Image (cartoon, rainbow, N blue to C red):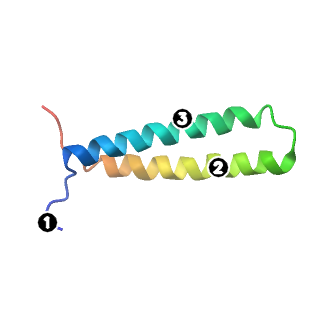
Amino acid sequence: MLNEKLAPNETMQIHEILNLKTVCMSTSKMMEGVVFDQDLKALLERDVQQSIISIQTLQKLLEKAPLIR
């Protein structure tokens, strides 16, 4: 691939996915405090950890986004 920059539509789509992952992670983190079942609590914690990794990956992808002047 010669062009390492993202197209504007790709940048917008990554932003949308990043917003969705952030909201989902926040919801899972909040639900951990009100859930009493330990299995469900562990599942929510795993979801939070995986979401953090996904968010970091998406943020790295956005580094390839073109700068707007």
Q: Crowding near pointer 1: few (<14 within 10 Å), some, many (20+)?
A: few
Q: Which mark is residue 23?
A: 3
Query: Which quadrant does the N terminus fall into?
Result: bottom left
Q: Residue 29, located in which quarter of the rendered image?
A: top right
Packing grade of label 3 (10 A; few <14, some 14-19, many >=20) is few
> Which residue occupies 39% across, 46% down?
59
**Do the CB atoms of the residues marked 1 and 3 lie less than 8 Å apart?**
no
Q: Residue under label 2, please give it.
A: 47
Taking the image as shown, residue 34 lies to the left or right of residue 53, namely: right
Foreground: disc 2 or disc 1:
2
Disc 1 marks a residue whose amino acid type is Leu
Image-based side of 63 in relation to 28, left or right? left
Sequence-wise, the earlier of marks 2 and 3 is 3
Whether label 2 touches label 1, CB < 8 Å: no
Q: Is mark 1 on a helix, strand or loop?
A: loop
Asked whether, in this view, residue 28 is left or right of residue 17, the answer is right
The residue indicated by pointer 1 is: 2
Q: What residue type is labelled 2?
A: Asp
Pointer 2 local density, CA inside 10 Å: few below 14, some 14–19, many at least 20: some
Q: For the point 29% across and 40% down, which residue is it?
A: 12
SS state under label 3: helix
Q: Would you say the residues marked 2 and 3 are in contact, meaning their CB atoms lie under 8 Å apart?
A: no
Residue 7: percent from left, percent from top: 19, 49
Q: Distance between the residues labelled 2 and 3?
A: 12 Å
Q: Where is residue 4 in the image (x, y as percent from the top left)?
A: 19, 58
Secondary structure found at label 2: helix
Task: Give the numbered dot on residue 33.
Answer: none
